[in-house]
Amino acid sequence: DSFWTASAAIRASADPAEKRRALLREYIEPGTPGLQAFMQAKGYTPECYLDAIERYPKFWASVRAGTLALADKTADAPQRIAALRKLYPPLRPATVYFAIGCLNSSGTTLGDKVLIGAELAGGGPDTDVSEMPEPRQRNLRNYFATRPADGLPLLLVHEHVHTQQKGPGPTLLAQAIYEGAADFVAERATGKLPPLDYVRYGRQNEARLKRDFRADMHETSYAKWLYNAPDPRYGVRDLGYYMGYAIVRDYYTRARDRKRALREIIELDCTDQAAVEAFVQRSGFYADDAATR
């Protein structure tokens, strides 16, 4: 609500200094600890908000109702978190915050805070992205077609898992496992995976992706596989999520004690490359030791 008050004041003024004052006065300065954490985690500044508000008026007009309706989409979230706690009894509590961001995160974490970007989580098929450049327009159109608000409990569980983990990873392999573990554990708690292209494409092309990922996985850049535009080799973004998921899946499947395995998956120190490589070896995902040298 505070964001929309600020947005209206910004649009009503022709004075750049007053626009900035309105943003600070109505939204940022009185913001929750979650908003402050969200800005810190994603590097958001007053300038990025002002730029987005003025650059994409059709987008903001079309997504407003969806952001305000998100509170009605969380009814079964406590049930899903309870299922997560049953799977992993040491689960530490986390606080969920909804905030408006600058269009680059539907969900992230900082410490014990789960931070939901309402301007993305609240979008849908009718959200107007026509003002945006390619490929952002295409990526958002595909994302909003999945009706992300309907999958909000799954997103909350995924992000809650991140508050239990140690990350980010120093290599693509480590970061893919960090993300894939959150997807895998969320699937155990909710029975679902995200309805996103990387899941569908990954399942259909796992053998090819397994080979290609092996060639890249020790790189320190995530760019080909995570958080970026679609890789031109596949036309799909974020396939690193699926590769991490597949490694974690095989680790869990091979385990004799699956309760213990789930705990090991969550508690894996993804900042420790040696620990990550040992985890991959034990998963059997790559049959020979060369995969982790």
Image (cartoon, rainbow, N blue to C red):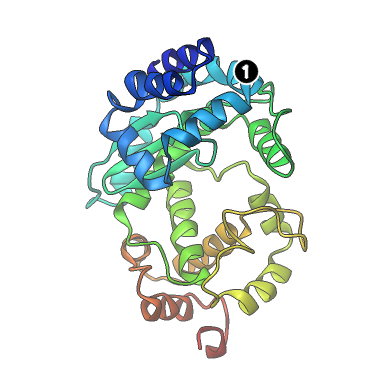
Q: Position of residue 74 (x, y in %)?
A: 41, 25
Left or right: 137 in relation to 253: right
Q: Say which quarter of the image contains residue 266.
A: bottom left
What residue is shown at x 32% (from left), y 47% (from top)? Answer: 110
Depth check, front residue: 207 or 213: 213
In the image, residue 146 sits, relative to residue 230, either above or below, namely above
Query: Label 1's element?
Result: helix
Residue 260 placement (x, y as % from top left): 31, 65
- Say left or right for 176 vs 92: right
Q: Is residue 197 visible?
A: yes
Q: Nearer the viewer, residue 215 or 261?
A: 215
Q: Residue at x 26, y 45 (%)?
A: 112
Q: How many marks?
A: 1
Q: What's the residue at 42%, 67% (across, down)?
A: 169
Residue 288 rendering spot, x and y as whole percentages = 56, 88
Q: Which residue is mark 1?
A: 62
| The N terminus - image quarter | top left
Occupied quadrant, residue 6? top left
From what the image shows, is residue 262 above or below residue 70?
below
Give the residue furthest to the top.
12
Is 86 on the left or on the right of 270, as rendered?
left
Give percent across and percent down for residue 23.
40, 23
Mark 1: amino acid = Ser
Mark 1, Cα crowd under 10 Å, few <14 / some 14-19 / many 20+, is some
Asked if 190 appears above or below 285 in the picture, the reply is above
Relative to 184, residue 218 above or below: below
Residue 150 seen by the camera: no
